[in-house]
């Protein structure tokens, strides 16, 4: 076994590798960018070395800097994790030339599968079924357009060197092809340094099923069954599970054989995943091979009881695979949910910020949490915004689903937008609960997933009020002056104490509830709280772990309420509501201003200006393209009007909320139109 390895990655995968290495007695060396100097994977490593500025292309994508760090630390091997340089054949070769073991497949295999077009040709020779499409070298736009027309719409444009849903566009009409191709190429070039694409027939309502394979340098190869990754948004996986629901032994064997044929066709060694698209009738087609460990590998580990990272290390050391195919078996069912810093209500825009509060459920043999962050850490705009992976296991699929549902309810995040509530709604949908899976599930369940926010119970407001009053009492105790004025028992000179708290309910969607008022009066046993048409008797104490022990009308339960500025985040009964504690005098005399400016919805880089200043545009017409975390977002005209001026240039990095475009609204009868000033984001 290796004495010391360098992990050429960050986040939860770096922490995951460190856990296995520590168990095996292997020292780990972390590398980090300036943005990650205090990251969890750095804190957990035996040794850590800086490799450059925050942007990935200046740090984690600099193979020479990583190899220099490995040699300086005396590492024997480099584990690339996934993403970054994990599927870079040149980096694998450079490691070998530097006398380092690359913990992954040979560079020849990476290169063969790195080009989706070349991989399709290889799979055709190996008799692996392929989706109808164009994988040719001629990348002229007119050639690609003609290929799409011949295949028949809808088609999928895919970056040939891509993965992870980047550089991918569905096109439903010939008229939309040119714009989609240009956007796909820009994203592919930014993400992979290669703008070459392929065109494939877009299969309607397919499933996405992948086979985990492993091979060693002694000629042995096997598969560790399948994972269903059909639940996706924007071609990126949201939920993964193993085994695939409805998979029978015969089809499993057939797909496993096809995956092993794909691996043998390129002389594969190590861990890899062969991904298939599966039609409703059961026909399956090769999509691509990921020559690395996958994000979703924990579900395979949970149903097999194996550590795939340990297998990677042993195979890289030259050992044979520890088991044969007939020694492998499936036990139970596992489901993984990816917890991201993103806003599902705003088309899953990535979010950035500090994890002010992070409370996870208690891990166990049936519940696994893979995270690369802790409370207080920051999600930056430079890398993938994953917070954690939550994996639940059960004897049956339903048992795993119920356990995951409870764990999602127990997971608490404050400080930035996240998809926890979306995931809870998603696994509760009838389609997911009944395993009616395909890649359109989120679209099919749109009404349930993105419907109106639930009404806020009075007791949630009561918890927020108790938390704010408690904070005010603590401040009073710290104050100066005579004891009677510092008293926290609500004593008043000539009248009973009464206080009104004004709350604005912050919803997950665009609509928000109107302001709510809670009138609080002190009583001998605590407080009396009056709402519109209801009264609650309330009291509260703080438990040893810092949560609140709340009693409302003689019913006692635990809750949590986190104050961040004017916001109060309340967690109780598996629900989460956000409130803004509003000062009713703060905005007296201020009126809303109708404005049409366009602001940045997230930090990012301007990649294209789509119209000329002075151009008249219609509502919804794209004006500018912003790239963040390797994903493009088109910012559109908020209404009919004129694009007066751009306040930014192509290539400029902008912050969230920055005004990008000066926009003049068309006049509305009875109202004056004007240029934007302090306008909301469009």
Image (cartoon, rainbow, N blue to C red):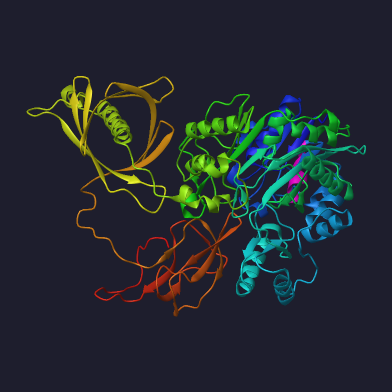
Q: Is residue 561 above or below residue 682?
A: above
User: Of residues 571 and 334, which is closer to you in this image?
Assistant: 334
In the rendered image, the quadrant that contains the C terminus is: bottom left
Q: Residue furthest front?
A: 281
Residue 220: percent from left, percent from top: 90, 37
In the rendered image, the quadrant that contains the N terminus is: top right
Q: Which residues are magenta?
A: 62-73
Residue 146: percent from left, percent from top: 72, 75
Q: Is residue 442 above or below residue 357?
A: below
Left/right of residue 148 with respect to residue 313 in the rendered view: left
Residue 49: percent from left, percent from top: 68, 40
Residue 480 falls within the magenta-colored stretch? no
**Viewer can see residue 116:** yes
Residue 404: percent from left, percent from top: 56, 33
User: Of residues 39 and 466, which is closer to you in this image?
Assistant: 466
- Count of number-bearing discs: 0
Left/right of residue 497 with respect to residue 26 in the rendered view: left
């Amino acid at each position: 076994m290796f004495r010391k390895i360098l992990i050429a990655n960050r986040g939860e995968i770096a922490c995951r590798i460190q856990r296995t290495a520590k168990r095996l007695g292997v020292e780990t060396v972390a590398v980090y960018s300036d943005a990650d100097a205090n990251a969890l994977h750095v804190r957990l490593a035996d040794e850590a070395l800086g490799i450059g500025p925050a942007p990935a292309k200046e740090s984690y994508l600099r193979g020479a800097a990583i190899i220099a760090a490995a040699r300086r630390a005396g590492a024997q091997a480099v584990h690339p994790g996934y993403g970054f340089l994990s599927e870079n054949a040149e980096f694998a070769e450079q490691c070998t030339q530097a006398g380092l073991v690359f913990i992954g497949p040979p560079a020849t295999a990476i290169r063969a599968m790195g080009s989706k077009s070349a991989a399709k040709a290889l799979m055709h020779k190996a008799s692996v079924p392929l989706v109808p499409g164009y994988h040719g070298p001629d990348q002229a736009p007119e050639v690609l357009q003609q290929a799409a027309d011949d295949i028949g719409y809808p088609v999928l444009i895919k970056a040939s060197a891509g993965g992870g849903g980047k550089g991918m566009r569905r096109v439903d009409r010939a008229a939309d092809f040119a714009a989609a191709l240009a956007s796909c190429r820009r994203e592919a070039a930014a993400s992979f340094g290669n703008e070459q694409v392929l065109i494939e027939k877009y299969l309607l309502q397919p499933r996405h099923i992948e086979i985990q394979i492993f091979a060693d340098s002694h000629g042995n190869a096997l598969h560790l069954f399948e994972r269903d990754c059909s639940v996706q948004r924007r071609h990126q996986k949201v939920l993964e599970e193993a085994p695939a629901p409805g998979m029978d032994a015969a089809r499993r064997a057939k797909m496993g054989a096809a995956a092993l044929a794909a691996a043998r066709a390129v002389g594969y060694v190590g861990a890899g995943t062969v991904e298939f698209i599966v039609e409703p009738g059961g026909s399956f087609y090769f999509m691509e091979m990921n020559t690395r460990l996958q994000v979703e590998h924990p579900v395979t580990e949970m149903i097999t009881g194996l550590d795939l990272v340990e297998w990677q290390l042993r195979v890289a050391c030259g050992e044979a695979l520890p088991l044969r195919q007939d020694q492998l078996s499936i036990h139970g069912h596992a489901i993984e949910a990816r917890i991201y810093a993103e806003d599902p209500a705003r088309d899953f825009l990535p979010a950035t910020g500090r994890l002010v509060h992070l409370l996870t459920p208690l891990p166990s043999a049936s519940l696994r949490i893979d995270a690369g962050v802790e409370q207080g850490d920051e999600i930056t705009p430079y890398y993938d915004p994953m917070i954690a992976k939550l994996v639940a296991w059960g004897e049956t699929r339903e048992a795993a689903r119920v356990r995951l549902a409870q764990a999602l309810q127990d997971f608490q995040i404050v400080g930035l937008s996240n998809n926890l509530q979306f995931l809870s709604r998603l696994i509760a949908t009838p389609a997911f609960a009944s395993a009616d899976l395909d890649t359109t599930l989120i679209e099919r369940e749109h009404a349930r997933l993105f419907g109106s926010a639930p009404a806020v119970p009075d007791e949630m407001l009561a918890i927020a009020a108790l938390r704010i009053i408690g904070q005010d009492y603590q401040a009073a105790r710290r104050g100066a002056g005579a004891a009677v004025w510092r008293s926290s028992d609500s004593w008043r000179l000539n009248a009973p104490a009464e206080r009104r708290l004004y709350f604005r309910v912050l919803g997950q969607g665009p609509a928000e509830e109107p302001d709510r008022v809670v009138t609080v009066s002190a009583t001998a046993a605590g407080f009396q709280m009056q709402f519109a048409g209801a009264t609650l008797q309330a009291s509260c104490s703080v438990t040893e772990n810092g949560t609140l022990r709340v009693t409302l009308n003689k019913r006692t339960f635990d809750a949590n309420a986190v104050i961040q500025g004017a916001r109060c985040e309340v967690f109780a009964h598996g629900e989460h509501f956000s409130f803004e504690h509003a000062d009713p005098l703060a905005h007296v005399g201020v009126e809303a201003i109708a404005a049409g400016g366009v602001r940045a919805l997230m930090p990012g880089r301007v990649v294209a200006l789509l119209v000329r200043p002075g151009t008249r545009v219609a509502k919804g017409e794209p004006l500018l393209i912003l790239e963040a975390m390797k994903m493009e977002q088109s910012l559109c005209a908020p209404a009919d009007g004129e694009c007066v001026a751009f306040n930014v240039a192509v290539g400029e990095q902008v912050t969230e909320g920055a005004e990008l475009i000066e926009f003049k609204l068309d006049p509305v009868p009875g109202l004056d139109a004007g240029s934007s000033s302090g306008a909301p984001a469009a």
